[in-house]
Amino acid sequence: MKFRHFGKTGQLVSEIGFGAWAIGASWGEVDDMQSAAALHASLDSGVNFLDTADVYGDGHSERLIAQVVKERGGAAPFVATKAGRRLPAQVPEGYSEANLRSWIDRSRANLQMDTLDLVQLHCPPTAVYESARVFDILDTLKAEGKLKDYGVSVERIDEALKAIIYPGVVSVQIIFNIFRQRVADEFLAKAKENNVAVIARVPLASGLLTGKM
C-alpha cells in the first residue's frame, strides 16, 4: 500500500480508502457480517483511511466501523465522517452551532471516539461557503476537542475553490474519475498550493468502472 500525507494535518493515510456508504445499507439490504469482513479485509491490506457519514444508514455505517476497529485493537485507522445531511431541507440557516454540535456529538457516540479525526460538511448549500460563520463554529468545536480537523465534501468545483480559502479547511472531497476530469484543470493545483488534501469521490463512477455493469 502507498501512503500520502493528508494535507496540512501531517497524518499519513493510504492512497486507497474504504468508502463506507454501502455498508450503511442506504443502497438496499446489506449483510453486516459481510460488511465487517470487507472492512477487515481492507484494513488487513493496508488501508487506513475510512470515509463515512452520519446519514449512511442513519449512523449504521459509523457504528459498524466502531465495532470493527474495537475488535481489531492496535493502531486505529483515520476515520473521516460528514455532517449536514440530517437537515430536512438544505438551507444555510440549518448549519447552526446547535445543529453542528448535535450532529458531531452523535457521530462521536456512533464511532466511539472522543475526538473525531475529520468532520466534513456534507455537500451544504453554496451560500455556506460564502460566509465564515459555519467555519468559525467548526473552529470552536475543534478548540473544544470534539474534532481534530475539518473539511468539506462538495458538489461543484466553484464550491471547492471557495472552501480552500478558509485556513481551517484541511481537505476537500470531490467527484473525480475518468468521466469527471474538470477538477484537474484548476482545482488540483490550487489544492496543492494550499496544502489541502483531496479525497476523490466515486472514483469508480458508482460501479460503472468496476466491470460489473
Image: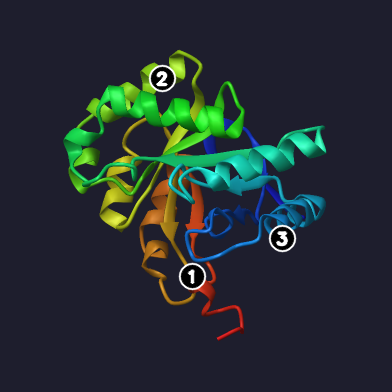
How many numbered marks have been drawn onto this rendered protein structure? 3
Q: Residue at x 75, y 34 (%)?
A: 70
Q: Residue at x 54, y 75 (%)?
A: 207
Tell me the crowding category of disc 1: few under 14, some 14 to 19, or many 20 or more residues within 10 angstroms, Cα based: some
> Closer to the observer: label 2 or label 1?
2
Residue that numbered label 1 is attached to:
177
Q: Residue at x 56, y 23 (%)?
A: 115
| Label 1 secondary element | loop
**Which numbered circle lies on residue 141?**
2
Image: 159 above or below 7:
below
Image coords of residue 186 (percent x, y) = 36, 58
Image: 190 above or below 76:
below
> Closer to the observer: label 3 or label 1?
3
Image coords of residue 145 (percent x, y) = 51, 16
Quarter of the image containing the C terminus? bottom right
Image coords of residue 188 (percent x, y) = 44, 55
Asked whether the viewer can see residue 6, the reply is no
Residue that numbered label 3 is attached to:
34
Tell whether label 3 touches label 2 (CB within 8 Å): no
